[in-house]
C-alpha cells in the first residue's frame, strides 16, 4: 500500500520570514475554536515551516507578519543522538505549495506559488 506523508495549514505569520542561502523559515499560528463543558475555548498551535529554492525566495520577498497563508507540504523526520547515545526525534515541515489568503496591511488578490 502506498502511504501519504503531508500536512496542510491555514494560519497567520507570527513574524517576518527568516532566510539564509536557499532556505526561508516562516513561523505561523493556527487557531481553532471548540466547545468544552458549554464554554467556547480558543486554542493556538505554532509551527515553523521551511521553504526551499524558488519558494524560499518568494516567501522572503512577499510575506510579512500577520499575513494569512495556506501552506501544504511534507513532514520530514530526523533522528539524532545526544552525547549519551540516547535517540531523539524531530520533525520538520517542508513546504511544497503556498497561497496568500489575506494581507495583514494590504489588499491583494490570492496568488498561488509552487
Image (spheres, rainbow, N blue to C red):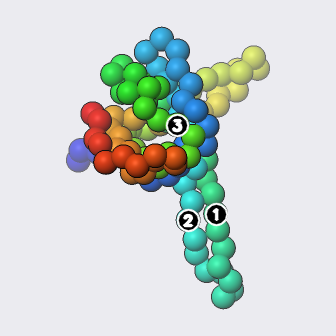
- Mark 1 → mark 2, Cα distance in angstroms: 5 Å
x, y percent for residue 3: 29, 45
Question: Counting other residues with Cα less than 10 Å from the Cα at mark 3, is it few (<14), some (14-19), or many (20 or more)?
Answer: some
Please name the residue shown 71% across and 21% down the image.
82
Q: Report the disc number at residue 64.
A: 3
Check if mark 3's residue and mark 1's residue have beta carbons within 8 Å: no
Residue ranking furthest to the top: 21
Secondary structure of the residue carrying numbered label 1: strand
Nearest the eye: 84 or 32: 32
Confirm whether residue 52 shows in the render.
no
Check if mark 1's residue and mark 2's residue have beta carbons within 8 Å: yes
Nearest the eye: 106 or 27: 106
x, y percent for residue 91: 53, 35
Q: In which quadrant of the rendered image does the C terminus lie?
A: top left
Q: Could you tell whether 110 is left or right of 48 in the image?
A: left
Q: Report the disc number at residue 32.
A: 2
Amino acid at each position: 500500500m502506498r502511504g501519504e506523508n503531508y500536512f496542510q495549514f491555514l494560519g497567520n505569520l507570527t513574524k517576518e520570514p527568516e532566510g539564509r542561502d536557499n532556505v526561508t523559515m516562516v513561523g505561523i499560528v493556527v487557531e481553532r475554536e471548540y466547545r468544552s463543558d458549554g464554554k467556547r475555548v480558543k486554542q493556538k498551535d505554532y509551527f515553523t515551516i521551511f521553504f526551499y529554492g524558488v519558494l524560499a525566495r518568494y516567501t522572503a520577498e512577499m510575506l510579512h507578519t500577520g499575513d494569512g497563508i495556506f501552506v501544504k507540504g511534507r513532514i520530514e523526520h530526523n533522528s539524532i543522538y545526544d552525547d549519551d547515545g540516547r535517540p531523539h526525534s524531530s520533525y520538520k515541515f517542508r513546504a511544497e505549495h503556498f497561497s496568500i489568503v489575506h494581507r495583514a496591511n494590504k489588499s491583494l488578490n490570492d496568488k498561488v506559488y509552487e
